[in-house]
Image (cartoon, rainbow, N blue to C red):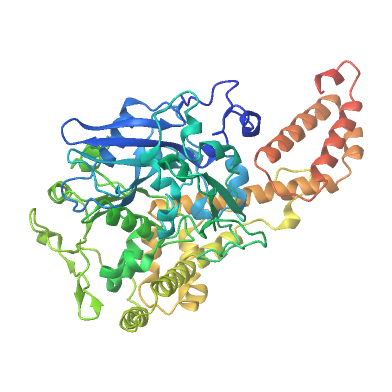
Amino acid sequence: MNPFDFPGSPRRGDAHRGDAHHPWARFSSWLECVCVVTFDLELGQAIEMVFPHDVKLTEKEKSSICYLSFPDSYSGGLGDTQFSFRLRQSVGRRAWRLREDIYNRDAPPTLQVLTHRHTHIPGHLQCPQPPHGPPASTFPPSLHKGPQPPQGCPKSSAGANVPLGQTGSHWGRPTPTGADRLPLGRTGSHWGRPTPTGADRLPLGQTGSHWGRPASPWKHARVRIPSRTDQSGGSPVRQTGQQVLPAPTVLPSVHELDLFRCFQPVLVHLHMLWELMLLGEPLVVMAPSPTVSSETVLALISIISPLRTCCDFRPYFTVHDSEFREFTTRTQAPPSVVLGVTNPFFIKTFQNWPHIVRLGETKMAGDLPKQVKVKKLSKLKTLDTKPGIYTAFKTFLHKDKILIKRLLKGIQRKRPPEVQTSILRQHLLELTQSFINPLERYMASLMPLQRSVTPWKTPPQIRPFSREDFLSTLDLAGPPLTSGLKGDWTGLYRKFFRSPNFDGWYRHRHKEMTQKLESLHLVALGDADLMSWTREKSEVEIVDFILKLREKLNKARRQQLQVKDGVLEKLETSIAAAVGLLPAALQPLFP
């Protein structure tokens, strides 16, 4: 059970009520908690402190955090380290404290919250290197941040500039009032709720005063969560005329990675990876470090945007993970999950997996990064496995050679990485939209006509999705209309229908269309003369009408249905008038 969900807790209900007594009330909408993990070569690793101090982690969660934090012996370097992970949360913990219905209304599909999928907590590790290096027997402490957005963590390079990750080693030990000793502890109550469309200003505190130096001006970051109306790539945060010193750390997007840097060694096989992600195929990424592993996994699940990824993923996975046996069993087919690993032991363990991407240190072949090759799974050796994509997968579509040449020429001409990433992201966005648009058009054709929605009948049902009927529309309105790629589009759709991504897309669209029908029905009821209808009905029919209409109004408010202004109020008035038609003995039953 979450420690903040008990009655009277400052985090329960409206967070503003607890701000005076608990400065972390609004902060918890962004982060589950921040942990400091100490590494000792003789004693092992342990969580030294947790902020907020009253967050209660289970022993299994603590163990998972410690093991995920430990820099395995196969990853070289002890410098500043950042990477992401996901750990299974304990049963009964409620990790999301945001009103997801309001948040989801404005957030893009890839950043919406799926309450029923809250089985794992996303986390981000920052391991700062002390100025004079770590002691001989310990590693630097690490910060674990459990961010709530579903897609992962802030992983842009700008994230390294946020003072939160640079001051953790100077925090004091937790006490009942220990929030005041945390550099951002006094600013937690000033953090607003995560809201798409707006730039959230996140104060981070005065960090200098904790190092025996004069206190520096208050630092803060400005984070913008994209809205569903934004184009890919987000938009920069507008700067106001007010001068703030020092300048804020601006993170225009909290979910988009440097795709070009992540995919440099596999650019010529990008379309194969796009198809694998679209179809929800099981895939293992073997990387030289947790940083490369997590960034590559997060980049892979983002390449089918704006389609929501409904497959599971682990940016960094270890042999100590509680789900290790579940993923490595050979008695059943591998699940639809993308795993990022660094331990060569997994080469032997995952030999039954159909797709393995083995990455090494980026090497240059002249002016261009050396591209890995597609190899047979039988070539996968336990020791000294060379970089490559080990798979028997045959792509349905042809490569876009023009895009590949454009990106490779951009490397030779020293084109800025930001421009390369923008080109790559725009191409992937258009490719995914070309694939999804025919599905969207067909799904819209299943929607009943608005004139069929009447106030005196229940809303009409959405017609069932027929795969064969959809495939018959591809000749006239298929992806070739908007995409230059040629290939077996029909075969790709047929396999997509069996993937978890199609199931998730269909459920989401069907829910949106059902809510639209409910909104149209409410409008029809609001425009109808309900009083004339109720005067001609019996008491039983009037009572049934009141109960059903009140239930419909409560459902509309819970789901935040979009209806015209004044419709819900007009229906409430109709309910009150209908109650007045009942005998006086029955009226108190409908307050």
Q: Position of residue 553 (x, y in %)?
A: 74, 37
Q: Is 373 above or below relative to 518? A: below
* Residue positioned most to the top: 585
Residue nearest the viewer, comparing 47 with 79: 79
Going 63% across and 44% down the picture, which residue do you hit? Answer: 102
The answer to whether residue 282 of the structure is visible from this angle is no
Q: Is 545 above or below relative to 528? A: above
- Quadrant of the snapshot with the C terminus: top right
Q: Position of residue 8 (x, y in %)?
A: 60, 21
Q: Position of residue 381 (x, y in %)?
A: 9, 56
In this rendering, would 183 be left or right of 270?
Answer: right
Q: Position of residue 166 (x, y in %)?
A: 39, 47
- Picture quarter containing residue 410? bottom left
Going 65% across and 47% down the picture, which residue do you hit? Answer: 515
How many numbered callouts? 0
Q: Is 508 above or below relative to 574? A: below
- Picture quarter containing residue 261? bottom left
The answer to whether residue 469 of the structure is visible from this angle is yes
Residue nearest the viewer, comparing 5 with 548: 5
In this rendering, would 305 be left or right of 360?
Answer: right
